[in-house]
Image (cartoon, rainbow, N blue to C red):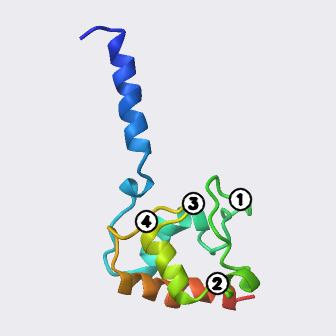
Amino acid sequence: MSRALLPLLLLAGATLSAGDPAKDLPKFQGDLQKYWTDACARCHGVNGNGRDNSGKPLPDAGFDFTDSRKANKKKDSDWVKVTMQGKDKMPAFKDKMSEADAQRMITDIVRKFAAKR
């Protein structure tokens, strides 16, 4: 293989793997809080506000679930749909968890962020 071709192939491989943000996400194993921390907090923050522990916005900051006025405008079914299908920067979790597990995540984790305010 030519030395000139190798960097192009590496770049092409990196571009292809970067196209699926859900690829790096773990599969749901039954523990909602652990899954929030492992998969969701990357963008939504541990506290659901899209910020890191020092209060700075995360690089791919997701929806701020602590903003109860905005968060409570959506029905659970809307949040489940976004979780399963993805939206904008949010990857689809349809291959990572069931719809029933996504519903539990909304009810048991996400809704509680908005209720704290």
Q: Residue at x 76, y 85 (%)?
A: 69
Extreme residue in the left direction:
1
Q: Earlier in the sequence, mark 1 or mark 4?
A: 1
Residue type, label 3: Asp
Residue tagged 1: 57
Q: Nearer the viewer, mark 4 or mark 2?
A: 4
Q: Quadrant of residue 96?
A: bottom left
Q: Earlier in the sequence, mark 3 or mark 2?
A: 3
Q: CA distance from mark 4 to mark 3?
A: 10 Å
Q: CA distance from mark 3 to mark 2?
A: 22 Å
User: Circle 1 sits in a helix, a strand or a loop, which is it?
Assistant: loop
In depth, the one of 101 and 39 nearer the eye is 101
- Callout 1: 10 Å neighbours few (<14), some, many (20+)? some
User: Circle 3 sits in a helix, a strand or a loop, which is it?
Assistant: loop
In depth, the one of 76 and 7 nearer the eye is 76
Q: CA distance from mark 1 to mark 4?
A: 22 Å
Q: CA distance from mark 2 to mark 1?
A: 17 Å
Residue 113 bears which disc, if any?
2
Q: Quadrant of residue 24?
A: bottom left
- Callout 2: 10 Å neighbours few (<14), some, many (20+)? some
Q: Is residue 10 above or below residue 88?
A: above
